[in-house]
Amino acid sequence: MHVLFVIDPLPLLKAYKDSSVAMMRALSARGHTFSVVGMAEIYLDEGVVTANAAGIELRTQADLHAHAWWRETTAARGAPLAKFDAVIMRKDPPFDMEYVYATHLLDYAQAQGAHVFNSGAAIRNHPEKLAIFEFPQFTVPTLVTSNISRLRQFHASQKDVIVKPLDGMGGAGVFRLRAVEPNLNAILETLTANGSRTIMAQRYIPEVVDGDKRILVIGGEAVPYALARLPVAGETRANLAAGGHGVARPLSGRDQEIARTIGPDLARRGLLLLGLDVIGQYLTEINVTSPTCFVEITEQTGFDVADFFVAALERAVGGQS
């Protein structure tokens, strides 16, 4: 296969722990080739969705902590997305309007024969924080609103809540509001931009001290280990970007139940790769844009997540040919 990655600039990636780079290594090991393109270099010209993509390969025995871990094999040139065997959307959020436009272009490319994972429509139709409402049996009491008074009422009833923006990532903008919170009004006014921006409030889940688990579901099947992201002392957020550290653990019975319920259905909708966030017994987010944690799970357990992903990609492309 020749695979196209829609991705952030390569010099910005931390190759030693980046899941997209792990995918590239697994593709190489299985004899596949790949090219890369930035989101801004995908364009529609005379009805054809085209990528100004460059072919790359990984340097043998490269230092993944350095910048020279890849080399360009072909200069960037325009090619229809449908000419690639698979297109993998791995651009990190923010999920802004430019991202939305890109998903529309991916939809047009798919109509022209491209095999896109995750598909543009599926990414758009499953906003990462809101998608949990399709599975209420796995969620804690949750409110989504921009109304400050309604948020205050929710806080008063639940006593201890987490509030966060709908478009945040890496723990940005996440606050815990305990029963007595002197900055309640200021936090809600800031997050909602004085009632003009919709946010999410969820009942606090105390089990977060035992880890905010990332469960990877690939081709409808769960990776048998989750990465439990543990918050540092004194911190509510367990996100790795917020200073948390990850410990790989086998999936619990509840984890498996959540993955079995959600994974196959969403795979049929065009979501080859999911990152389910689970705290204790509860589902808190469904990540569909560029789920990570491949490397951490592989290094700690020996289960090759990236190879598992590439095998699923091969099956998906073969099934769509």
Image (spheres, rainbow, N blue to C red):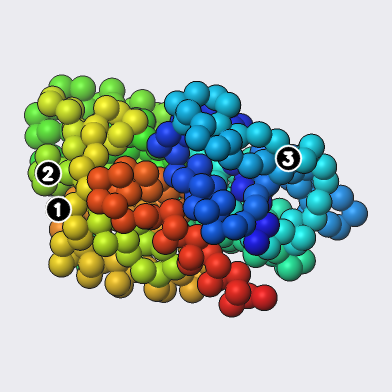
Image depth: mark 1 or mark 3 in front? 3
When the figure is inspected, residue 11 is found, relative to residue 17, above or below; the finding is above
Classify the position of the C terminus by image quarter.
bottom right
Q: Which mark is residue 210?
A: 2
Q: Which mark is residue 109?
A: none
Label disc, if present, on residue 73 of the rendered structure: 3
Q: Position of residue 58 (x, y in %)?
A: 58, 40
Q: Which residue corresponds to the image point at 53% horizontal and 72% vertical from the top-left?
A: 315
Check the image and report above or below for 306 versus 178: below
Question: 287 left or right of 84?
Answer: left
User: Tag 2: residue type?
Assistant: Asp
Mark 3 and mark 2: Cα distance apart in space = 45 Å
Identity of the amino acid at label 3?
Thr
- Whether residues under marks 3 and 2 lie with C-beta atoms below 8 angstroms apart, the answer is no
Amino acid type for the residue under numbered disc 1: Gly
Element type at mark 2: helix
